[in-house]
Amino acid sequence: MGERQINRFEGGDLVVKSLQAQGVRQIFSVSGGPLNSIYSACATHALPLHHTRHEAGACFMADAISRLTGVPGVAAVTLGPGVTNTVTPALVAKMAGTPLLILGAQANTASFERGAGMSADHIPIMQPVTKFAARVLQTERIPEYIDIAFRRMWAGTPGPVFLEIPVNVLTAPANDMELPRFVRALPGLSAQDRKSFSAAIANARRPVLLLGDDVRWDPPPRLEAAVDRLHIPFATLRLARGAIDETHNLCIGPGYIPCNKTLARALTETDLVILLGHHFEFDLEFGRVVGPNTRVMQCVIDPERLGRNRKTDYGAVASASSFVEMIAECAATQIDRRWVDGLAQAWHAERDAQLERSAGGDALHPVAAIDAVLATLPPETTLVCSHGNVDFWVDARVQLRQPNHYLRAGQSGALGAEVPYAVGARFAYPNRPAVVFVGDGGVGFHVTELETAARYKRPIVIVVLDDQKWGAIALPQMMAYGGEYEMDLPARDWPKVAEGLGGVGAFARTPDEIAKAMRAALAADKPAIVQIPVRSALSPYMAHIS
Ligand SMILES: Cc1ncc(C[n+]2csc(CCOP(=O)(O)OP(=O)(O)O)c2C)c(N)n1
Ligand SMILES: [Mg+2]
């Protein structure tokens, strides 16, 4: 980053210093003239600035920073099309419940309503895809607005916020001032709830614990010990993937019914579902499989999610950590250990059966390809997964050993987040490998961010699982309509694309070739693409929801 050439303090300095006061450690952008004040202030105040290839890429990278570090990521984008390019990542963050601050430029207020170049009416565009969208009209109020944005971002379920700052507000002279820092404070479980909840857990014979999103933003210190002591089977959902080591003997797999029959069975047979930091959402089939006489205990930080889609018998709006404190002190339980151990074994058998069924065939089955890739990865790897058919196989195969090492767009199911997420992961943790699983369709969305990875020396590895089609759409289409309509994607040379963008690449067709190609890619000091031809095999998830 170049050194600053001017000697004045203005709105852009207030933006950068306010972000730093809030704990922000870097900012993503695609260059835009009205943002020059912010760029110059980044140099003055040593806030690293990373320029990406597309505003969506910048926002997805910032979202990855939020998810992996817990400190909100920030993207600054130019006006008009710069802002509209952020609509999808804002929606993804809103649906996933991840914090993200998007700063949008705006034309000089003196030209409002005169048709200034590039200028658009951003607030009504951003309002439905954010939790808060506002315009800052006074330079001296920049720190206050950024503080409000942080408050709104963290209130209830976290999510994205948008601030628009006109260029004359950014470039007006300003005075340095004391800057606010928002600190999130969460309510604890009340004494009354502690008492009634622990009595219900002590009396349960077949409880199941589902660990969800709140656990990511408020990691409970003694979670694994509490689970061990009570011998409760658990599943991890979405942002809480890896909250406890998923190779643990009480883990019954990922918390998504469509790719986990064992979980569906557990929820049918349980007498107490403990839903921590989550609600009965789409991937839990809105709670429909939970028996009518099963009691539901739910603890969430956002009252809006309490009892949503399925009534709760024991409900609390409280922090995940205070809830885990309660279960850590629960009295001895009536737990049916045979049932619990049988569930964990059933999940292992379900996983093993996936592998057995994948044998043979010309091209590799996705499961064989995915397992071969996973076997090459160091434990500190950040894994990123897209949303095609092959990626639902990944979701079912991967066993996260630790929290905050898995990135997936989530509820929005958006293709396109995956490559920028991996680059963002490399900015969050420069020394951890970042590996993306993506189909031959999904890779086309933001593969150009591989160039950003090359430019900033953040060598990600993109694994393209290539079935030569839009498989997730094609396979169910064939089942429902007896044909495929424009679903084929011709064989393309993605390693060559990597080379053109400043990286390296290789094809791999067998487990041995995968091991070799992955080792080379992980050791390269450039970003890499490993392209693996796979056969088109409908994942249990897609089969279930189609
Ligand atoms: C932004 C966006 N556009 C379209 C879709 C719909 N969609 C879901 S999966 C899929 C096919 C993905 O193809 P590919 O990446 O090759 O993975 P495959 O399903 O073949 O394994 C499409 C088009 C989506 N999820 N997100
Ligand atoms: Mg495909």
Image: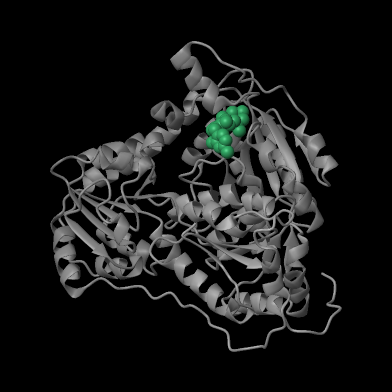
Using the image, determine if residue 532 lies above or below residue 152. above
Q: Which of the two residues, 12 or 73, is positioned nearer the viewer here?
A: 12
Q: Which of the two residues, 268 or 6, is positioned nearer the viewer here?
A: 6
Q: Is residue 6 left or right of residue 478?
A: right
> For the point 57% across and 47% down, which residue is it?
88
Using the image, determine if residue 7 lies above or below residue 226. below
Using the image, determine if residue 239 lies above or below residue 285. below
Q: Which of the two residues, 80 or 191, is positioned nearer the viewer here?
A: 80
| Residue 53 percent location from the top left of the image | 75, 50
- Quarter of the image with the C terminus in it: top left
> For the point 49% across and 19% down, which residue is it?
477
Furthest residue toward top: 482
> For the point 73% across and 79% down, which residue is it?
45
- Quarter of the image with the N terminus in it: bottom right
- Residue 138 falls in which quadrant of the image? bottom right
Q: Is residue 388 visible from the viewing direction of this image?
A: no
